[in-house]
Image: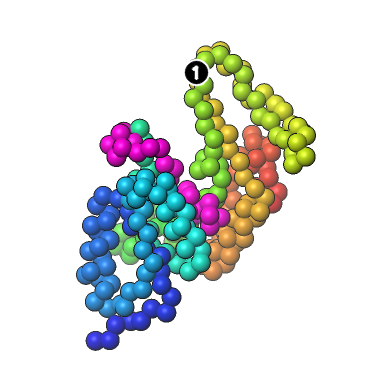
Amino acid sequence: MDKIQMKTPLVEMDGDEMTRVLWRMIKDELLSPFVELKTEYYDLGLPERERTQDRITWDAAHAACRLGVAVKCATITPNRQRVEEYGLSEMWKSPNGTIRAVMDGTVFRAPIVADMEMFPPLVRGWKQPIIIARHAFGDVYKSTEYRVPGAGRAELIFTDRSGQETFRATVSDYDGPGVLQGSFNKDDSIRSFAHACFGFALSVRRDLWFSTKDTISKQYDQTFKLI
């Protein structure tokens, strides 16, 4: 039997632990016998991310943008325990977050829909799946965090390109230890998120609903609503 020929290579992003084994089995048993695989291989396992100082993640993300299609295995986002276990020089950030930031991506999570008669949904009136779209640029994935050691003041300051301070506000006056997180987003990315959502909804013929907390977040979430 002739194998299916691939015209465009796909970006192959290997992962950590058992996903490396499973992906190899999938390739050997389900793909290679039927498809003439063409891939650009990137090892996103923790040892390689450590060796390259996470450069491999950025290279894989840019390769995915260049080729337009990629398969990524599950990876470990290290915590303190993993840093000690793998002897890491740094608590490397989430590869998913890095890749999404490079792609300016939107995450769509769609359920696998089974036969409605054999497996009726808990809410019987639901006839179509609910697909969740999540903006995947900035926010917590690119946030700056600080463990506040004791009493003090946290401020939010913006300085424009000319070096002039145009905004200053007190975030919190700390009486003791705490935590601090600063997140951001950009109009271009929010607009891209909106286009992705509308385009996807049209392609699958689904209603589109938008949820935000603009009554509380009168600048951050309100900007999403206005755009």
Q: Is residue 78 above or below residue 104?
A: above
> In percent of the image, x 55 and y 31: which residue is there?
181
> In percent of the image, x 39 and y 67: which residue is there?
40
Horizontally, residue 132 falls left or right of residue 197, namely left
Residue sitting at the far front: 51
Is 99 in front, or is 190? 99
Residue 69 point in image, percent of width and height: 45, 67
Residue 101 among those drawn in magenta: yes
**Which quadrant of the figure contains the N terminus?**
bottom left
Q: Which amino acid does label 1 sit on?
A: Pro
**Can residue 160 be seen?**
yes
Residue sitting at the far bottom: 1
Q: Mark 1 points at which residue?
A: 149
Horizontally, residue 164 falls left or right of residue 86, namely right
Horizontally, residue 68 falls left or right of residue 117, namely right
Residue 149 point in image, percent of width and height: 50, 18
Residue 41 among those drawn in magenta: no
Q: In this view, does 13 lie above or below 203?
A: above
Q: What stretch is highlighted in magenta?
A: 81-107
**Can residue 130 be seen?**
no
Horizontally, residue 194 falls left or right of residue 88, namely right
Residue 112 point in image, percent of width and height: 37, 60
Is 56 in front, or is 218? 56
